[in-house]
Image (cartoon, rainbow, N blue to C red):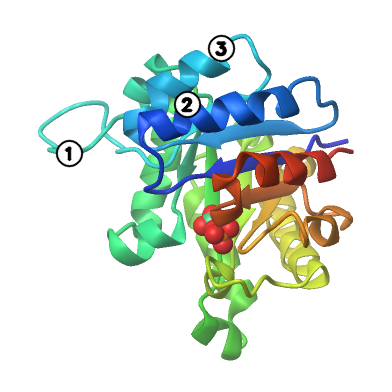
Amino acid sequence: MRTPLVAANWKMHKTRAEATAFVEAALPQLTGLDGVEVVVCPAFTALETVGRLLAGSAVRLGAQNLHWEREGAFTGEVSAGMLAELGCTYVIVGHSERRRLFGDTDERVRRKVRAAFDAGLVPILCVGETLEERQAGQTESRVAGQVAVATADLSADEVAHLVVAYEPVWAIGTGQAATGQEANRVIGLIRQHLRHRFGPAADAVRIQYGGSVTARNAAEFFSQPEVDGALVGGASLNPHEFAAITRTARR
Ligand code: PGA
């Protein structure tokens, strides 16, 4: 059975002081939870602080982005090796905000996924359709296409460790979450595509839902057989709400 993974994506929120206050409030509630894995993804500037506070706990550290090269003249960028050195286990790759605002194409996402594995990090690969794509009946082709390109260089062994976050773009930060059933349907399709390409390794891949997940609607998603946890944005900024979501995800 797959252990669900609940990840906090803080985006560009929380200074080091605010991140410290969050961990101090959340960690007692996140300690000793069986049947769920928890990840916190702060901004780069708070990674070291949060990593230090989480050390010795079961809560993992993740970053929100990386560059695909190991080093070089890439002003403002951060490499996978730098994140691994800070104690990151996970890194979010291809978030729709990065795709929409910062030029992360499918091809760049592929290179970032490769770079993450090469440095020993586990990518949380974000995929999802826009409202226009959904209305044009292109949800499956868009999502399958994103997954196919992003995993093009991976071995079945690597894929078995991959985390995918299905995040319909229209559901992110809008309060308009998908239904549990719809999330389950698309996640099932993603798994089928992975199975077709990588065989039984697909059954080990954790595929999360993301997009306006809150403590109130979390159970609707986590009760679905294909949904292996959530990538949580806005609701992850509050330690009590985030802890409540992680408790709901336990299997
Ligand atoms: P949201 O963001 O929970 O605020 O909708 C999710 C995400 O962007 O990962």
Query: Which of the marked residues, 1 or 3, is nearer the chain's N terminus?
Result: 3
Which quarter of the rendering shows the C terminus? top right
Ligand 1 image-quadrant field: bottom right
Dot 3 beta carbon under 8 Å from ligand 1: no
Which is more toward the observer, 243 or 42? Answer: 243
Q: Give the labeled residue for mark 2.
A: 20
Quarter where residue 28 is shown: top right
* Percent position of residue 121, x then y: 49, 27
Q: Secondary structure at mark 3?
A: loop
**Mark in front: 2 vs 3:** 2
Q: Secondary structure at mark 2?
A: helix
Q: Amino acid at mark 1?
A: Gly
Dot 1 beta carbon under 8 Å from ligand 1: no
Which is more toward the observer, 100 or 51? Answer: 51
Q: Give the labeled residue for mark 3.
A: 55
Q: Residue at x 39, y 29 (%)?
A: 17
Quarter where residue 48 is shown: top left
**Mark in front: 1 vs 3:** 3
The answer for how far apart the CA atoms under marks 1 and 3 are is: 27 Å
* Percent position of residue 144, x then y: 60, 64
Contact between labelled residues 3 and 2, with CB atoms less than 8 Å apart: no
Q: Residue at x 67, y 32 (%)?
A: 38
Q: Give the labeled residue for mark 1.
A: 76
